[in-house]
Amino acid sequence: MTENRPKLQAGLAPEVFSEYYYLKVELQDFCQEQGLAKPGSKADLNQRITHYLRTGERLASKSSEKKVFREEYLTLDSLIEQGIVFSEKHRAFFKSELGDTFVFKVAFQNWLKENAGKTYREAIAIYPEIAARKPKKIDSQFEYNTYIRDFFADNRGRSLQEAIACWKHKKALPGSNKYHVQDLSALESD
């Protein structure tokens, strides 16, 4: 497959930029090259880059305010920080309390953010309930996950390799990255 997607560089028309899919790491690399703030979600980076391509103006990141950790070591009685940042310190703490199967699911991250001031003991107690819930929808920044889910919903019996091949074809095209049955045409050229 030939990559028809334009290179992300200064001078790219913002309308063209918004038509294509770029990995978060590509967006961060561009931000670094252009002196733009790198922190934030993929949506934040897309917005910052679009603004820069349109105006030449460098927007500050929403998270430029310093986040302060109140405690060096977390305990069950530590309080969940306001504006919590999910660091390796947090991951190690939760793995030590919940085991190696612990993962930072979006629903749990949201619970932590919404419950600043509660204890980590309360977070440990609620985690099994939150982890057992099936997500109602996949957040918009997870385009790949949404595409793969929709691919399999429409193509039972197909392989993950086929889904990935269709995804790679789709993300190289301008426009929406949502699955469409026409994406199966990517498998015909193999």
Image (tube, rainbow, N blue to C red):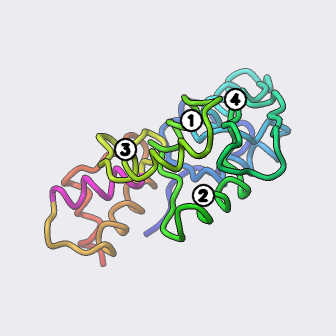
Residue at image mark 4: 82
Q: Considering only order in the chain, which callout, 3 or 2, is on the residue closer to the N terminus? A: 2
Marks 1/4: CA–CA distance: 22 Å
Q: Considering only order in the chain, which callout, 4 or 1, is on the residue closer to the N terminus? A: 1
- Residue shown at 50%/47% (left/top)? 21
Q: Considering only order in the chain, which callout, 2 or 4, is on the residue closer to the N terminus? A: 4
Residue at image mark 1: 43
Residue at image mark 3: 138
Q: Which residues are magenta?
A: 144-154
Neighbour tally class for label 4: few under 14, some 14-19, many 20 plus, Cα within 10 Å: some
**Location of residue 163 with respect to 140 vertically, above or below:** below
Q: Secondary structure at mark 4?
A: loop
Residue at image mark 2: 94
Residues 119 and 93: in front is: 119
Quadrant occupied by the N terminus = bottom left
Amino acid at dot 4: Gln
Front: mark 2 or 3: 2
Front: mark 2 or 1: 2
Residue 62 occupies quadrant: top right
- Residue shown at 54%/29% (left/top)? 114
Marks 3/4: CA–CA distance: 25 Å
